[in-house]
Image: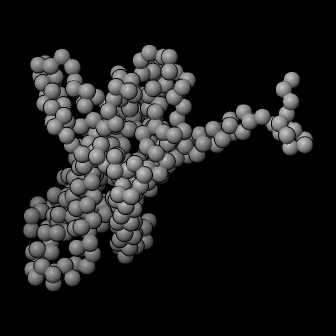
Amino acid sequence: MTNMDHGKFTRVTTYFHSLLALDVFLLFFTGYSVMFNDELWWMVEFMGGNAGVLALHRIAGFGLIVLTVFWVTLMLIGPGRRKNFKAVLPTPTDAKAFIQDVQFVLGRADERHPNARQFAGYSSDEVPLLSYVGKGVVWIFTVELVLLMISGLLIWSKVGLAQFFQTKAAATAFVTFHGLLGVVMVMGIMFHIFEHGFHPAFYPVEMKAFVPKSMMPHEEHEDHEGTGIELLSLRPTWKWAVNVAGAAVVIGIVSVLVGSIFDSGYPVPAGLTVGGGPTSILLTIGINVGMFVLLLGVVLSTYGNVLRARYEQQVASDEHDSEPEAAADGGQPRDE
């Protein structure tokens, strides 16, 4: 273990992160099956047709609400959680860090601000719990998820929504807003998968996100100078894997954006579209590539949890082997 191997989360947060990821992935798969039902016809059929897709989407949406309520409650009443919540709030120092980062890029600053440091080239003591970039990611995802939940609840029944807002145009606007939020959010999710799945120091999976920090040993390299990144070596498959994954992310994002314009009805109203249905085989392939990237995220998340379980078993086995054997009469064995 090195300084690079510190855990990110507590055990509860680790499990919550995995459950939230699986729920969001299910929302994406079902939501995009509705949005691109021509290009993703096989996903629609796999999930039981239109009725099955909509049912799964609503179940996943309800699961997202439950997870959110649980997390908010935990943050309010959990031991030490309010302190963590305060750590996520933006501060004036974060604004200074952003300005200094811009100056650093322009060559007008010698180094990045301490609040801008992420885990690359620094020891764990020199890196804040969350850089201003990390805080931004947290708040962007939070706002997007909240807006998705609110708009999703409002369009749960399109008939009821139209009656509530009196006009079909207002109801359609919320449907459009909900769909476009999904399009925007999928870009962040794809980049998130690429960043944490293909980082050269952690490829193919970033174990820090799966193994609780309470289980991470830190004492083995306390006398080692540096972060430990100099002890790492690239896997032979990293170069081609990162190129393939990077190309898939770009193709998937562009295809989803273009497809959301050309596909009529959802998320863009038919009156604003310039086409309808699968306009070309390339667009269909591109959208399916985007779904492959999301599926890759599910695989990496599952793989990370499998490795976590194996690591926990290994730690438990090592602790059991290190315990002294009891004497036959129940007392402590005599030292030789």
Q: How many marks?
A: 0
Q: Is residue 107 visible?
A: yes
Q: Position of residue 327 (x, y in %)?
A: 87, 38
- Which residue is most to the front? 331
Left or right placement of residue 274 versus residue 195 in this view: left
Q: Position of residue 3 (x, y in %)?
A: 45, 26
Left or right placement of residue 207 versus residue 96 in this view: right
Residue 21 against residue 313 in the figure, above or below: below
Q: Residue at x 47, y 51 (%)?
A: 12
**Which image quarter holds the C terminus?**
top right
Residue 312 against residue 159 in the figure, above or below: above
Q: Quadrant of residue 122?
A: top left
- Display colour scheme: one colour
Residue 109 against residue 154 in the figure, above or below: above
Q: Position of residue 34 (x, y in %)?
A: 30, 66
Q: Residue at x 24, y 37 (%)?
A: 132
Q: Residue at x 42, y 67 (%)?
A: 47
Which of 324 and 14 lies nearest the eye of the viewer?
324
Q: Position of residue 202 (x, y in %)?
A: 44, 32
Q: Is residue 67 visible?
A: no
Q: Residue at x 90, y 41 (%)?
A: 328
Which of 296 and 306 lies nearest the eye of the viewer?
306
Q: Quadrant of residue 158?
A: bottom left
Residue 203 against residue 166 in the figure, above or below: above
Which of 83 and 99 lies nearest the eye of the viewer?
83
